[in-house]
C-alpha cells in the first residue's frame, strides 16, 4: 500500500507541475494550416512563452471557465506585444487557439492595398526575396512571390503573395480600437485573420503567449521537380 500511495503522490505531483509549467511558463502547439508559411510550416511543433505579455485567464490551463482578470485589459500585468511579434491567442468567436503576427497595436491605422500593407499612413517596406511554387494541402499548385517585410522597430520577416491573388484580402483603412490588436498571417492570400469579420480585432485579454521557437518539424512533401518542399527544422528561433 505504501508503494501504491507513493506512486499516486508522484503522479499527482508530476501532473501538478506540468499544469503549472503549461499555465505560467510555456506551452507547445502543432501547426495544422499554412496561414503562417513560411515562418511556420504545416506539421511544425513550436513553443510559446506565456510570460512576455503578462497573464490573462486564457493563459491558464482551463482558464476559459475562470472569471475575467481585473483591469481594462484583463491581464496581469498588462504588457503590449510589439509590432511583428508572432503570438498565440484565443479566437474571439470560435474559441480555437490561433497563431498570427501582430501588425496593429491600439490606435494604429491599418490598410491593405493591392496586397501591400499600410501602417499609420505609410506603406510598410517590402523587398522581393524569391519566387516558388508549392502544392497546398488540397493538392493544388500555388505560385507565390516571397518578400521581406519590415514593420516599425522589428526585424524583417518573410511574407508570401500569390500570383493569382484575390482583392478580397485588401482592406480600407481601419483604426485599431483600445484594448485590441490587428493580426495577419504571413501567407497573406491564405489566412483567415483580422481583415475579416469572422475574426476582427483581437482583445488583448485573448493573448496566450509569444511564439518563440520551432521545436521540430514533421513537414513533408513528395519532392516533385520544380516544387518547393518545406524544410525540416529543429530548435529554430521564430522571427
Image (cartoon, rainbow, N blue to C red):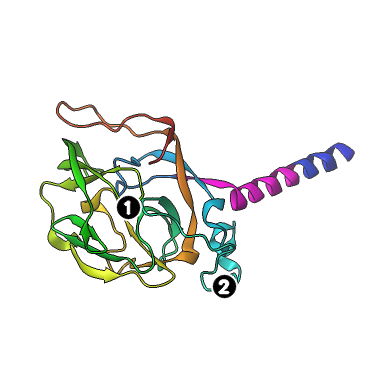
Q: Nearer the viewer, residue 111 or 91?
A: 111
Q: Which residue is mark 2?
A: 71
Q: Is disc 1 in contact with disc 2, using a CB cutoff of under 8 Å? A: no
Q: Nearer the viewer, residue 178 or 28?
A: 178
Residue 48: horizontal and vertical position, in percent?
Answer: 49, 46
Rendered position, 101 above or below 171: above
| Residue 226, percent from left and from top | 14, 28
Q: Is residue 18 magenta?
A: yes
For image coordinates 39% across by 45% down, the residue present is 31
Q: Earlier in the sequence, mark 1 or mark 2?
A: 2
**Vertical order, 201 against 30 (above or below):** below
Q: Is residue 116 left or right of residue 178?
A: left
> Which type of secondary structure does the marked residue at label 1 adopt?
loop
Q: Which residues are magenta?
A: 11-29
Left or right: 174 in relation to 10: left
Label 2: how many Cα within 10 Å (few below 14, some 14–19, many 20+): few
Predominant SS of the magenta segment: helix
Quadrant for the N terminus, please.
top right
Viewer-side residue, 116 vs 56: 116
Residue 161 in the image: x percent, y percent? 18, 47
Amino acid at each position: 500500500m505504501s508503494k501504491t500511495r507513493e506512486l499516486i503522490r508522484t503522479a499527482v505531483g508530476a501532473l501538478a507541475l506540468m499544469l503549472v509549467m503549461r499555465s505560467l511558463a510555456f506551452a507547445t502547439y502543432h501547426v495544422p494550416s499554412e496561414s503562417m508559411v513560411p515562418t511556420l510550416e504545416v506539421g511544425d511543433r513550436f513553443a510559446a512563452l506565456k510570460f512576455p505579455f503578462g497573464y490573462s485567464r486564457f493563459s491558464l490551463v482551463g482558464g476559459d471557465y475562470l472569471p475575467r482578470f481585473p483591469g481594462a485589459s484583463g491581464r496581469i500585468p498588462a504588457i503590449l506585444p510589439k509590432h511583428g511579434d508572432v503570438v498565440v491567442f484565443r479566437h474571439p468567436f470560435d474559441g480555437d487557439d490561433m497563431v498570427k503576427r501582430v501588425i496593429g497595436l491600439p490606435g494604429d491605422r491599418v490598410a491593405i492595398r493591392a496586397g501591400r500593407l499600410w501602417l499609420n499612413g505609410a506603406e510598410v517596406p517590402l523587398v522581393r526575396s524569391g519566387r516558388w511554387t508549392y502544392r497546398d494541402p488540397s493538392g493544388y499548385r500555388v505560385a507565390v512571390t516571397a518578400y521581406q517585410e519590415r514593420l516599425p522597430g522589428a526585424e524583417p520577416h518573410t511574407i508570401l503573395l500569390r500570383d493569382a491573388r484575390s482583392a478580397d484580402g485588401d482592406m480600407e483603412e481601419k483604426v485599431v480600437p483600445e484594448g485590441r490588436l490587428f493580426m495577419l498571417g504571413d501567407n497573406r492570400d491564405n489566412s483567415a485573420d483580422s481583415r475579416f469579420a469572422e475574426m476582427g480585432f483581437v482583445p488583448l485579454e485573448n493573448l496566450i503567449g509569444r511564439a518563440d521557437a520551432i521545436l521540430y518539424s514533421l513537414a513533408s512533401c513528395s519532392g516533385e521537380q520544380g516544387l518547393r518542399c518545406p524544410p525540416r527544422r529543429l530548435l529554430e528561433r521564430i522571427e
